[in-house]
Image: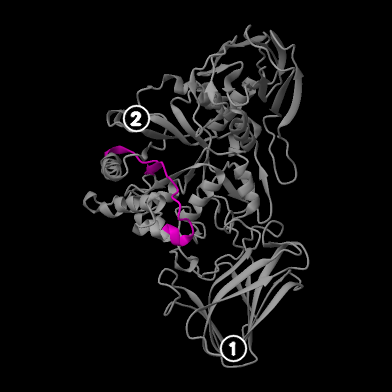
Amino acid sequence: MRKWAFLIAIILLINTLSFTVDHVLTFEMSLIHAIPQTLFGIFFEDINHAVDGGLYAELIRNGSFEHIFSLEGWALELCEESIEVSVDTSNPIHPNNKNYVRVRSDDPNAEIVLINLGYTASPIRGGIPIKAGEAYNLSFFVRTVGFTGEVSVYLENRRGEKYAESLVRISEQIDDWMRISLELVPKVTFSNSHFVMRIKGQGELHLDMISLIPKNTWHNMRTDLINVLKDLKPGFFRFPGGCLVEGDSLSNAYRWKDTIGPIEERKPNRNLWGYHQSYGIGFYEYLLLAEYLGAEPVPIFNAGISCQVRGAEYCPVDELDEWIQDVLDFLEFANGPTDTYWGSIRAQLGHPETFNVKYIGIGNENWGDQYHERFKLFHTAIKEKYPEVKIVFSGPPSYEGSNFRYAMRWAKENDVEIFDEHIYASPEWLLANTERYDRYDRTGPRIMLGEYAAHAPGRQNNWQAALAEAAFLTGVVRNSDVVIMASYAPLFNRIGFSQWVPDLIWFDSASFFLTPSYFVQKLYADHTGDYLIPSEITNEDLVLIGYRYKAIYHVCTYNSKSNEITVFLVNPWPDDKSVKIQLPENIRTRKEINLIRLCGSLTDINNFDDYAIVPVHEKIISNSCGSFDFIAKGYSFNVLKIGLE
């Protein structure tokens, strides 16, 4: 409670502040340094059901019966005494998917109904969404032992009204697992349907890998969610974690080889966040996605250490070769020619061209000598075979304190190329630390800000958090000779299946909404130029309960392709600020200056029904030379696009 009271006191004090003086922004038309194209990217981790029930477009929950509770997601109806239903493991499709459903009946007229509710979070936002006239690919594996009968498959509502239906008759023995593929085309649009398999017959029927995926997907991924990622124009794509990579023990650490190939041969897993991963999206799909997004892939691998925060399990150093070989095999898979073993596997999957992976991360939020010793072994082996690949060193979970200082010192002494920092902090901390990277050693490692977010009171995705992030990112852009990558985290949250807040994008079975933080990240990604230019603003600092703030936060960049200057201005205070933009004497501007503004109350949030925070586009008329006046509204993030003649 004391912490909450402290935060509330700061917010109340901030809201009473009033900077009454005007501010003058000046800049020069000289180039300080190039801004890397990788600066703004995305970090994808299967947390909050970001994959299963999320980006992976599979609508059936637990279609392989591999969850810890093997019938999770399924309901049984109309069971009669003459019917036996069980989950069997004696003769699976593949050793990696050992569970399947066994139905046995002595009565040819007996029926059993299997019902899957999809990813049901609530009566409103759960279930299986369907659209009239759109095709859905249904498939399942079947095997029989003396079974004759039929399997009716359909989509229905809670009242039993059917929207699409198909019938499979079985009259002959099926000794080996056989995939049956059908197409369902609903007659109506409905947000909360159920999938039903009605089995009638005599004998023994085995079922597994039941799948329902919309035909209109991209590599079995939801196109609506793919598009909002594409709109971020990410320069890099970090995957698959995160703590997910570590596991809460080494037995459930993420192993990339388990995630490629036919879905029935992938080895599913219970992840660190406590739910089942089907690996319907695996390393191959992640590489395809990075390629489609135009982003540099940055895969992260386990360092032979499970999550240290949760009580680490360490692979003995003399047994580490298996983990190191996994990374080397991946690089052959991603970058090797097709006449190599893993390069040929990539080609068989449909991508003979290499993915040209340039970055590899070893470990996530690891620290201490145990990690450093293992990192050096990975580093030596990778550089020996792939000297061109840059290796990302994991910083600890903390961004301050003794563990962080020791890690950074070790990284400098051992010529680490890239250091991965994670910053989850209060809005006040971010506002007070926009100069953090000004002090970083330019001869030390480059920085990947692999995870960042403002955690406002209550961990809300509100405008207070996003506004602080906008201010902090002015320092990231200004120091982009040191910080070469930055990504918000986490990326996705499935309504009703949350393990972590806040998040960048929220979604349910059929729709999504974008948070204020999403729009902040997008404005930076859209409008940051390729060079930093020098700029100054008349300002005054304020010390408040140990924090030093600024009246206005800003950074200026130049886009050499469009011949534009972009000014990013953040006013985190309640009062409007008058800013005079003083142009250099030797340049002339186009008549109209474009302004994109985000503005609102600190507590404003976006949701499915209402977007309180969205970009607003305006025009400012300049006099083509000299200067012009601009009002930075209270609680606003402003992007000024100044075209040069």
Helix, strand, or loop for circle 1? loop
Q: Is residue 595 left or right of residue 336?
A: right
Q: Which amino acid type is marked by label 2?
A: Met
Q: Determine which residue is flagged by label 2.
A: 408
Q: Nearer the viewer, residue 556 or 423?
A: 556
Span shown in magenta: 346-369
Instruction: Please report contact status of discs 1 and 2: CB closer than 8 Å, yes or no.
Output: no
Residue 85 percent coordinates (x, y): 54, 81
Q: Which amino acid type is marked by label 1?
A: Glu
Q: Residue at x 65, y 63 (%)?
A: 215
Q: Residue at x 71, y 15 (%)?
A: 630
Question: Along the polypeptide, which appears first: circle 1 or circle 2?
Answer: 1
Q: Determine which residue is flagged by label 1.
A: 81
Q: Is residue 260 visible?
A: no
Picture quadrant of residue 61: bottom right
Residue 477 percent coordinates (x, y): 52, 25
Q: Residue at x 35, y 23 (%)?
A: 443
